Image (cartoon, rainbow, N blue to C red):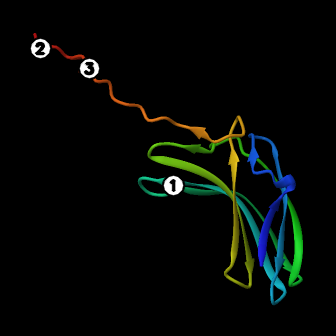
Amino acid sequence: MIEITLKNSRTSFRPGETIEGSAVWRLGAPLQKGELSLGWSTRGKGSVDQEIVETQAWETAPASGQRTFCFTAPTEPHSFDGHLISLDWWLELHLEPGTETARIEIIIAPTGRRIQIERIERASAPSPNLFPQR
């Protein structure tokens, strides 16, 4: 079992705020390596973009344990939902040995809420002729 818990169960942050919590695990063997990453990825139409912004890693630990962490919420990009694409921030925990990972989604935006990007409809009137014939 591996798990990420956030302080006060908070999942929404403004740029520059502190993201605090702990990584908890119970494995069958001592931990050889642990890695907690803060990153973002896109979803929707087209290819997926992804970036790991910061990683905290540690070597060797008992088979059961807990590690606290602290990240500073980056200034950009902001969490958003659009008609064609959305951007999600997440924390992901990977422990070795093993293939199990834990991931928790968070929001990073100026208001602490996902930005909603509305679809812009084409105007029903024809476009003006920018290059009239003479």
The disc at residue 43 is 1
Question: Foreground residue, 32 or 81?
Answer: 81
Count all numbered tags in the image, as a single digit: 3
Secondary structure under badge 3? loop
Quarter of the image that includes the C terminus: top left
Secondary structure under badge 1? strand
Relative placement, left or right, of 105 versus 49 is right
Residue position marked by numbered label 2 in the rendering: 133
The vertical placement of 74 against 134, above or below, is below
Residue drawn at 78 percent across, 41 percent down: 16
The vertical placement of 2 against 41, above or below, is below
- Residue closest to the far bottom: 29
**Where residue 107 sits: x, y (%)?**
69, 47
Residues under labels 3 and 1: Cα distance?
Answer: 33 Å
**Where residue 13 sits: x, y (%)?**
76, 44
Residue drawn at 74 percent across, 81 percent down: 96
The residue mark sitting in front, 3 or 1, is 3
**Where residue 89 sits: x, y (%)?**
65, 53
The disc at residue 102 is none
Residue position marked by numbered label 3 in the rendering: 125
User: Which label's residue is closer to the chain start, 3 or 1?
Assistant: 1
Quarter location, residue 126: top left
Q: Are marks 2 and 3 in contact (CB under 8 Å)?
A: no
Q: Amino acid at mark 2?
A: Gln
